[in-house]
Image: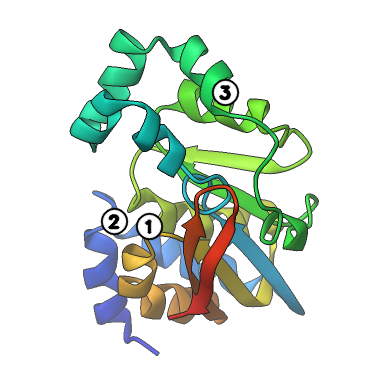
């Protein structure tokens, strides 16, 4: 477990108001602890593989990162892109583990784009949370547990194709929430299935 000072140092990288840590610590003290798991799944390349998109669109292959969004909006047209590239035929291995009443799908990116993806994938029964960047997912999980779940699960299981931030902030999350964080590294085989889902 991290010391308070070490937790504060980590928190400074996540927010410009790191002293919110003290508020979270006090809130956690009042939450019930339950022998249960909270599952958190990423969307892109965790539930729905984007490999086919890269194969079919040269501009997407050549413009990764922030440029990806610009290409989709300006060159491929947002609605057309969603209609042509997203569907309900994707592997359900992880999705079938999620309880729509408790677990969440946590994705980063442009809000409208991510919502349209989730809608086309028919994820309406699930709680889909959208943050700006990958690193924002850490605070999003902490806040979800404290303010929406309102109890401390004995384990939080995260499914991610890019688990680096969860690995980096595992100790902070475990120390603050008094829970175990299990991180599952996901590698998809397009939308045909999964190459592997392994704990890291």
Residue 179 picture location, percent across and down: 57, 81
Q: Is residue 191 left or right of residue 78?
A: right
Q: Nearer the viewer, mark 3 or mark 2?
A: 3
Distance in Å between CA atoms under marks 1 and 2: 11 Å
Q: Indicate which disc, 1 or 2, sits on the residue closer to the N terminus.
A: 2
Residue 161 picture quarter: bottom left
Q: Is residue 85 above or below residue 33?
A: above
Distance in Å between CA atoms under marks 3 and 2: 27 Å
Residue 96 picture location, percent across and down: 76, 58
Q: Residue at x 65, y 45 (%)?
A: 90
Q: Indicate which disc, 3 or 1, sits on the residue closer to the N terminus.
A: 1
Q: Is residue 150 left or right of residue 138?
A: right
Q: Nearer the viewer, mark 1 or mark 2?
A: 2
- The label on residue 116 is 3
Closest to the observer: 34 or 77?
A: 77
Q: Indicate which disc, 3 or 2, sits on the residue closer to the N terminus.
A: 2
- For the residues labelled 1 and 2, say whether their Cβ atoms are less than 8 Å apart: no
- The label on residue 14 is 2
Q: Is residue 52 above or below residue 21?
A: above
Residue 94 picture quarter: bottom right
Closest to the observer: 22 or 90?
A: 90
- For the residues labelled 3 and 2, say whether their Cβ atoms are less than 8 Å apart: no
Crowd class of label 2 (few under 14; some 14 to 19; many from 20; radius 10 Å): some
The residue that mark 1 highlights is: 20
């Amino acid at each position: 477990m991290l010391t308070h000072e070490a937790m504060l140092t980590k928190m400074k990288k996540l927010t410009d108001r790191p002293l919110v840590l003290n508020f979270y610590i006090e809130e956690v003290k009042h939450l019930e602890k339950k022998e249960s798991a909270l599952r958190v799944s990423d969307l892109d390349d965790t539930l729905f593989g984007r490999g086919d998109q890269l194969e079919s669109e040269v501009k997407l292959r050549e413009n990764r990162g922030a440029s990806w969004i610009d290409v989709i909006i300006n060159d491929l047209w947002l609605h057309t892109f969603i209609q042509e590239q997203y569907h309900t035929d994707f592997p359900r291995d992880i999705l079938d583990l999620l309880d729509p009443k408790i677990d969440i799908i946590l994705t980063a990116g442009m809000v409208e784009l991510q919502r349209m993806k989730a809608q086309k994938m028919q994820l309406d029964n699930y709680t889909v949370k959208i943050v700006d960047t990958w690193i924002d997912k850490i605070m999003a999980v902490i806040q979800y547990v404290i303010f929406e779940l309102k109890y401390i699960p004995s384990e939080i299981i995260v499914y991610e194709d890019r688990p680096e931030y969860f690995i980096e902030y595992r100790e902070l999350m475990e120390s603050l929430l008094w829970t175990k964080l299990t991180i599952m590294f996901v590698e998809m085989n397009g939308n045909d299935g999964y190459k592997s889902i392994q704990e890291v």
